[in-house]
Image (cartoon, rainbow, N blue to C red):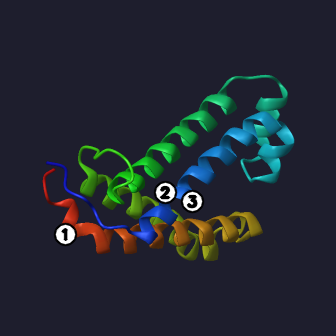
Amino acid sequence: MQIQLPNNKYLLIAALLSIVAAVLHIAIIIGGPDWYRFFGAGEAMAKMAEAGELQPTLITIGIATILFSWGFYALSAAGRAPRLPLIRTALIVITTIYLLRGLSVLFIAPFNIEFQSSFWIWSSAICTFYGLAYAIGTWQQWPYLSKKG
């Protein structure tokens, strides 16, 4: 018998955010070098893309794949997709990565001017928001995620 998980708006928001980020990464590949620059991938990635090298595409597809899987884990935890293995562990890891990425700028920026740019500040704020959505949703759903079903 399948256990019905309660709706969890935070995990649904987290899923949407991760999936939107994944789609944006795919759009960056399509958009080309100027998009790599605009979204802060760095001049080296943009120049490799201009030269037709495969590395920027592979890295960006890898990131998009990870983000899609994170979105799917959030959907699973919210009961909107089939239950995935190690769901509680995955949600903790995903939450931790988003929060560490988001909050790391607070500790690095005072010592490295590159991390004081608007890209790092905005992307860190976005990652922190994502991490909070995962954290709150996971905390609320935790008791239900331990049940087999």
Residue 107, x across and y down, in percent:
53, 74
Report, in whole angstroms, how far the alpha carbon at label 2 lies from the one at label 3.
Answer: 5 Å
Quarter where residue 120 is shown = bottom right
Quarter where residue 118 is shown = bottom right
Q: Which residue is mark 1?
A: 143
Decide if residue 76 is in sight here: yes
Q: Which residue is mark 3?
A: 17
Report, in whole angstroms, how far the alpha carbon at label 1 lies from the one at label 2.
Answer: 19 Å
Q: Classify mark 2: helix, strand or loop.
A: helix
The outermost residue toward the front is: 1
Q: Classify mark 3: helix, strand or loop.
A: helix
Q: Classify mark 1: helix, strand or loop.
A: helix
The crowd level at tag 1 (other Cα within 10 Å; few <14, some 14-19, many 20+) is: few
- Camera-side residue: 28 or 55? 28
- Label 1–label 2 contact, CB within 8 A: no
Left or right of 73? Residue 115 is: right
